[in-house]
Image: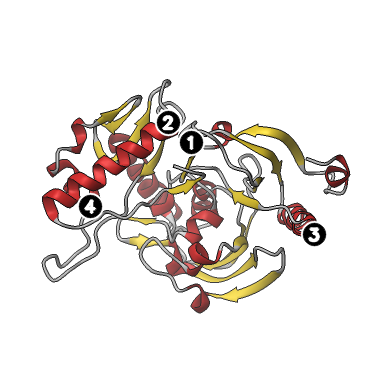
Amino acid sequence: MDVSLINSLPESVRVVNDALLSQYTTFGLGGRCPALLDCPDAEALCASAQRLVEAGIDFEVIGQGSNLLVSDVGIESVVLRYCAEEHPVVSVDGCCVRVSGNTLLNDLACTAIEHGVGDLSFCCGIPGTVGGAIAGNAGAFGRQIGDVVESVRLMEKDGTIREVAREELEFAYRSSVLKQSGAVLLEALLRLERCNIEAMRSERDEIMALRRSKHPDWRKTPCAGSVFRNIEPTSAAGRRQAAGWFLEQAGAKAFRVGGAHLFDKHANIIVADPDATAADVYRLSEMMITAVREKFGFDLTREIKLLGTF
């Protein structure tokens, strides 16, 4: 990246030229980008985005990289990273919680519980940032984070900032308007409910135990969680059905491409061995789509985001 442009960035921004993106995703896969700008707060993120817009440089914004599959050949865009892994920004005022988009979702859930506004226990153990969670309307156990969002502060792709009410976000199952617009969530205002702290701590412990029994720990077993969305209710199914069930029935658990294979306890989670490539994961996901299509007659929808050329 041009030295003069680097010098115009906020001092708090850490610049990594020719960054290897495998170091910034939970899959541990992916090639390089021209530069990665690690932005510690919303002000640094917005200022950096505006500098890049002025210079005519394309950029992508990522959080913890827990929902990304980056191409082996990398990408041509600069990457802005907005992820606070050590210093969550959460303030609680009664039942209102204000949280930065770069705060990890699990940190938000735990903080809310300790303040006695714990109806975010379903978020415990879900990797990624609050910004990514709200954009994808993350959820579990029949609940979703969009249900508690009051308003958000967004950065548009051109670097401009605006406040948006919940109604404008068009929340749907694992989706919101942010997925299409590309706007980045800087901060969110949530309205929660009063709860019994001990009861919510117990619920959190139960949820974490359940996750450990069914899901791999991405720190030890590189993955990106569920690869495909669950199946929406139809005339033939009165409730949402797990994509993993269809995949298991289609024989996907036996699939392997190179160093990529299915987690032994969950047919909708691809794990990456040390010798895996992003191409392996992508080809395996295509095999999974084909298997379900041939057996059940419909196409699965990816929950993970593809970045780069496949």
Q: Which element carries disc 4, helix, strand or loop? A: loop
Query: Residues under labels 3 and 2: Cα distance?
Result: 37 Å
Pinpoint residue 227: horizontal percent, then vertical percent. Answer: 34, 45
Does residue 216 appear in this view?
no
Query: Residues under labels 3 and 4: Cα distance?
Result: 45 Å
Q: Residue at x 42, y 63 (%)?
A: 175
Q: Earlier in the sequence, mark 1 or mark 4?
A: 1
Q: Mark number for residue 229? A: none
Tell me which amino acid carries mark 3.
Glu
State left or right for residue 287 relative to residue 280.
Answer: left
Q: Mark number for residue 222? A: 2
Q: Earlier in the sequence, mark 3 or mark 2?
A: 3
The quarter of the image holding the N terminus is top right
Tell me which amino acid carries mark 1.
Thr
Tell me which amino acid carries mark 2.
Pro
Query: Residues under labels 2 and 1: Cα distance?
Result: 6 Å
Instruction: State the residue position of label 1.
Output: 26
**CB atoms at circles 2 and 1 under 8 Å apart?**
yes
Does residue 42 appear in this view?
yes
Task: Identify which residue, 6 or 201, lies in the foreground.
Answer: 6
**CB atoms at circles 1 and 4 under 8 Å apart?**
no
State left or right for residue 140 relative to residue 14.
Answer: left
Q: Which element carries disc 1, helix, strand or loop? A: loop
Instruction: State the residue position of label 4.
Output: 242
Task: Name the mark nearer the viewer: 3 or 1.
Answer: 3
Q: Residue at x 20, y 38 (%)?
A: 252
Q: Earlier in the sequence, mark 2 or mark 1?
A: 1
**Does residue 288 lie above or below 200 as drawn?**
above
Q: Earlier in the sequence, mark 3 or mark 1?
A: 1
Instruction: State the residue position of label 3.
Output: 54
